[in-house]
Structure formats: structure tokens, C-alpha cells
Image: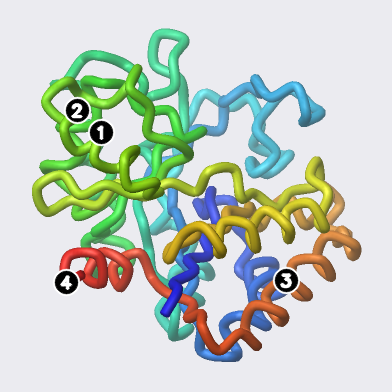
Amino acid sequence: MKLLAIRDDDACFFTDPARLARVHGPLLEKGFPLNLAAIPLVSANVKLRHKKLRGEYEPFISPEYRGREACFQIGDNKALVDFVSRTPGIHIAQHGCSHAYVNGMAEFDISDRAKIGEMADSGKEIIEKAFGVRPAFFVAPWDRISRAAYPVLAERFEGISTGWLTKDTVPFSWMPNYIIKKFRHRNYALVGGALMLEHRGCILSPSSVPQAVRELIMKNLKMHDIVTLLTHHWEYFNDDGSPNAALLNAYHEIVSELSERKDLRFASFDEIRRAVRSA
């Protein structure tokens, strides 16, 4: 049985749960799991570095807050907390700490292990306080993780969802695991008890061509038993709240098509970790 994880990034203080429901309703109504990557203490002053996106600040920040020198705890979004608590199937992963830059670098792409540990721990406490659960999986902002950060995070989480594991970023002590992964053509690696899981560019966004994303998913499902599809709920809406109907329809069609497959099951990251460890 093949396993498919749906990962949605950037849930935070600014997230409108009605938009989450609009995007993922067809998934959740079928009882399928959603891996929601939540920012514990989001910064309102994160400027864009993505050439494909327009504007000065990260679009998931509400327009009236953009540019403020302040951070906001996810638990203060009571509507979001209530939505998650009453919606079966949502599994919370930790998405960085503030989703900000540290000395000009993505916050978990730095080399200061003490700072990395401090951010990871404080973020985990905020998530637990908000949702009553300790996040088992970690997702770094922009999937940027330094060689120094990997072991710090692996000590604190049961798994990490990222883009690609590369020889230039994995710790030297992990090289045997990395070589085994490459030799066996896997998109994951077990390091101790922690699972490192790659999405390998399976991303549905306004800048992608839905048919190309669908074909990439199908290609990965032929090659691998585990696949992660990454999306961002805020990308399905404009600043004025109007939906991107074409993107919504494309996502819902992909979910519907995949749900019909008898050889595939939608899965949480934790379920995938258990399956890999028991294999």
C-alpha cells in the first residue's frame, strides 16, 4: 500500500480557518488526514525573497499587520484553535518558530546550535499550549535546514518533512544513512528513530501547472511507496479574500482522483513514520 501525505504550510495567527475548510474540505470530509504545518510565533515583518511572488511581505501575513515589528502566538487565533480541535484528521506539525530570518538567513539554516535548539523548544511549547499536543514532526521555513540544525531537530522531533536531503547539508555522521537512501532510490531516510522525508518538488501553487504537478505525483507514486504533496492554503486566495477558483478546482480534482486509487492511502506523517520503522 502506497502512502500519500498532504502537507499544508504556514498556519498561524493570521490564518482564517474558513479558508482552510474551503481548501481542504473535500479531503477532511472523506476522513483523510491533513498534515498542517503551524508557525508557533509568526513574525509580521518577514519580507519576500521569492521572485515568483508579488509584494514586499510574506502573503500569509494579513495586510493590516505587514511590516509591524512584532510576533504573534498561534494560540491567540482562537478561531483556528477551535477549528483544529473540532476537525478530525488534522495533524499539527511545527513549522519553524517565527518563520523569520536570523542574521539574513532562514531561521533554521543557521549554524548556531544553541539558538536552533532554543527556537525549536520555544516553538514546541507554544504549539503544545495552543493545541494540547506536542508536535512530532518538524517543517523548516522554506525547507532550509543547515548541517548543524539537522541533529538538533532530530533529537527533538520524530521526523522532519523537507524538500531534498543533499550531501551538502546532511551531517557527516549521517552519510551512511544518506548513501543507503541514494543506493535504494528512496525519498526518505531513518536516522536513529527519526524519519527524514522528502517531498521532491511535489508542490501545487499558483506558479505551478496543475497537470504537471499531477504528472509529477503520479511519477513519484510509480517510483516510491511514500509521496508528499505540498501546498499552502493562503495561495488559494487573493488579499481581498476572493478565491483562486482554478487552483481550488485543480487541488480538489487531484484529491478526488487519488482517493479512488485502491493501492493508495492518505496518511499522517506519524503513520508514515510507524510504517517505515516496522518495514
- Counting from the top left corner in percent of width and height, residue 99 is at 46, 34
The answer, for residue 111, to whether it is visible in the render is yes
User: Which residue was labeled with disc 2?
Assistant: 175
Structural distance between the alpha carbons of marks 3 and 2: 36 Å
Say what secondary structure mark 2 lies in: helix
**Disc number for residue 277:** none
Q: Residue at x 17, y 42 (%)?
A: 154
- Quadrant where the N terminus lies? bottom left
**Hey, what amino acid is under mark 1?**
Ile
Circle 3 Cα neighbour tier, 10 Å, few/some/many (<14 / 14–19 / ≥20): some
User: Which residue was labeled with disc 4?
Assistant: 278
**Disc number for residue 254:** 3
Among the two numbered marks 3 and 4 on one chain, the one whose residue lies closer to the N terminus: 3
Among the two numbered marks 4 and 1 on one chain, the one whose residue lies closer to the N terminus: 1
**Hey, what amino acid is under mark 3?**
Ile
Q: Would you say 199 lies left or right of 279 here?
A: right
Q: Residue at x 42, y 42 (%)?
A: 162
Q: Would you say 144 lies left or right of 173 here?
A: right
User: Which residue was labeled with disc 1?
Assistant: 179
Structural distance between the alpha carbons of marks 1 and 2: 6 Å
